Image (cartoon, rainbow, N blue to C red):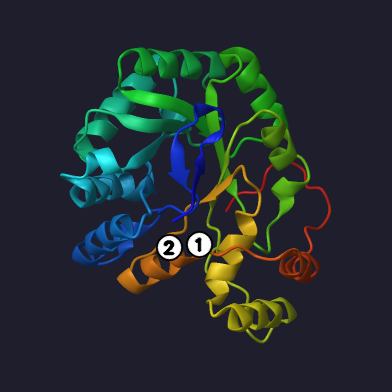
């Protein structure tokens, strides 16, 4: 599995990790086994959130990483309604308890909310001082939100911005991704296969994916992941509820596309016009 420095933090992180959104809907034993096999395959960046399954997914992740915490680059997220100074501290303690660990690697604000961002960042800084998280960052932040966050936190404090990014939703390439690249802030792509609507083989884009995959002895999903992480600041966190899917995702982290292949995909999945705001699910 290819690893890259996670932006300014310098921590080597696999380009492909494991997302866990909606994993509470899967068979628990199967989901835990899948996460563990993913770790074995190098998918050691594991992302979760207090929102997922109202805490049940954090508990599931905790079971999966038990005895292997030091292998994992562990990320969780606080809900905006809990993002006051005291609310962040309480939420983090609850997440740590569910995860069965004493620390996170990164703690994120799930999306901008009503609480002053100054309070949220002050709480994040307190958690860093207390050793409860190594770094902190944001999710679903547009460039205006990012500018404010960096102005409040200072340089080399916002560890990443986690956003929606897949072949048919490339809006972040207009402004958010270049903004983060210039500042050494990694972009973490959630739902990198879309929300249950991965390009069908019969579509024009799907045919291009299939052709490239066949030529490379890969799967279309591996090609899609390789395209997203062609940017050195992008990391992807696909969810897998079956072992075979996790192993398929892991193999995508070792695939490097040629310039011609990337150009073909760029034409097949145009990024479209600049959006208003950052896209979400």
Q: Is residue 166 visible?
A: no
Q: Position of residue 266 (x, y in %)?
A: 77, 64
Q: Is mark 2 on a helix, strand or loop?
A: helix
Which label sits on residue 202? none
- In this figure, which residue is indicated by the disc labeled 2? 250
Q: Position of residue 189 (x, y in %)?
A: 56, 50
Q: Residue at x 68, y 36 (%)?
A: 181
132 to 228, vertically: above or below: above
Label 2 vs label 1: CA separation?
Answer: 8 Å
Q: Are marks 2 and 1 in contact (CB under 8 Å)?
A: yes
Which label sits on residue 254? 1
Quarter of the figure with residue 176: top right
Number of the front mark, 2 or 1: 1
Left or right: 29 as drawn, with respect to 159: left
222 to 280, vertically: above or below: below
Label 1 neighbourhood size at 10 Å, few (<14), some (14-19), many (20+)?
Answer: some
Hey, which residue is sitting farthest bottom in the picture? Answer: 202
265 to 210, vertically: above or below: above
Hey, which residue is sitting farthest left in the picture? Answer: 67
Label 2 neighbourhood size at 10 Å, few (<14), some (14-19), many (20+)?
Answer: many
Q: Which of 100 and 7 is in front in this view?
A: 7
Q: Which of 108 and 66 is in front in this view?
A: 66
Q: Is mark 1 on a helix, strand or loop?
A: loop
Quarter of the figure with residue 158: top right
Q: Where is residue 75 in the image (x, y as percent from the top left)?
A: 39, 38
Q: Which residue is drawn at 19% across and 64% down?
A: 29
């Amino acid at each position: 599995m290819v690893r890259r420095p996670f932006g300014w933090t310098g921590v080597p992180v696999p380009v492909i990790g494991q997302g866990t959104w909606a994993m509470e809907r899967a068979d628990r034993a199967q989901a835990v086994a899948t996460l563990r096999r993913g770790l074995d395959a190098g998918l050691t960046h594991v992302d979760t959130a207090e929102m997922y399954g109202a805490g049940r997914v954090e508990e599931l992740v905790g079971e999966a990483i038990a005895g292997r915490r030091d292998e994992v680059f562990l990320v969780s997220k606080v809900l905006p309604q809990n993002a006051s100074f005291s609310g962040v501290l309480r939420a983090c303690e609850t997440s740590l308890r569910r995860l069965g660990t004493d620390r996170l690697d990164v703690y994120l604000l799930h999306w901008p909310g009503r609480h002053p961002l100054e309070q949220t960042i002050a709480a994040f800084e307190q958690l860093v001082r207390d050793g409860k998280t190594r770094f902190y960052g944001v999710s679903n932040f547009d460039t205006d939100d990012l500018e404010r966050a960096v102005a409040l936190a200072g340089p080399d404090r916002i560890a990443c911005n986690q956003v929606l990014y897949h072949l048919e939703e490339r809006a972040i390439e207009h402004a958010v991704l270049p903004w983060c690249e210039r500042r050494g802030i990694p972009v973490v792509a959630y739902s990198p296969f879309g929300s249950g609507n991965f390009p069908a083989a019969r579509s024009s884009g799907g045919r291009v994916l299939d052709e490239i995959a066949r030529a490379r002895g890969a799967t279309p999903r591996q090609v899609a992941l390789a395209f997203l992480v062609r940017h050195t600041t992008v990391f992807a966190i696909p969810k897998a509820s079956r072992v075979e899917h996790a192993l398929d995702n892991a193999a995508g982290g070792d695939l490097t596309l040629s310039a011609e292949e990337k150009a073909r995909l760029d034409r097949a999945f145009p990024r479209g016009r600049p959006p208003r705001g950052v896209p979400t699910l």
